[in-house]
Image: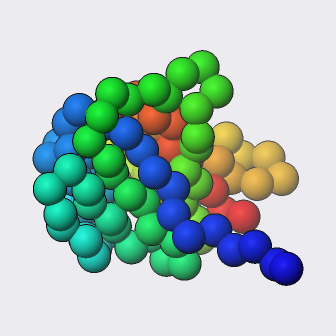
Amino acid sequence: MKMKAARVILFTRQIDKMTEFYRDVMGLKVVTNDPGWRELDAGGITIALHSGPPSPGRKGPKIAFLAKDVAKAREALNKRGAKFGKVSEGQYHLCNGKDPDGNPIQLSNR
């Protein structure tokens, strides 16, 4: 049996703020909008926001978003309110940031 990722679930006490971030800043479409549960289409999987205490921890999940031009995507997203750091340009171009709850997110060209 081959497994396929369906969603990443992030627990949050700021469901509206997190929805706004992933919808308005990251540009994802809300596909489920139930009390205490939101899902956003992230192209092949969904990001689900579930009401509850967040727990990003020191090694929490990292959601990586594919960007053909990481520097250009970083600039556009930071103008919309994201907080992505410096672009690392080695074999791959990567740029790390955090959502409003502190969950790690990344832009990557791989």
Q: Position of residue 26 (x, y in %)?
A: 33, 59
The image quadrant that residue 4 belongs to is bottom right
Vertical relation: 97 (above or below) 9: above
Q: Position of residue 54 (x, y in %)?
A: 38, 29
The image quadrant that residue 28 belongs to is bottom left
Of residues 5 and 83, the one drawn nearer to the viewer in this rendering: 5
Residue 59 in sight: yes
Q: Position of residue 25 (x, y in %)?
A: 26, 55
* Quadrant of the drawing holding the C terminus: bottom right
Residue at the (23%, 32%) spot, across then down: 13
Furthest toward the top, the residue is: 58
In-image side of 77 versus 13 (left or right)? right
Vertical relation: 46 (above or below) 59: below
In-image side of 103 versus 88 (left or right)? left
Q: How many marks?
A: 0
Of residues 81 and 69, the one drawn nearer to the viewer in this rendering: 81
Q: How is the image coloured?
A: rainbow
In-image side of 1 versus 86 (left or right)? right
Q: Position of residue 5 (x, y in %)?
A: 64, 68
Residue 79 in sight: no
Residue at the (64%, 48%) spot, across then down: 94
In-image side of 53 versus 107 (left or right)? left
Vertical relation: 44 (above or below) 21: below
Vertical relation: 65 (above or below) 61: below
Residue at the (79%, 46%) spot, across then down: 90
* Quadrant of the drawing holding the N terminus: bottom right
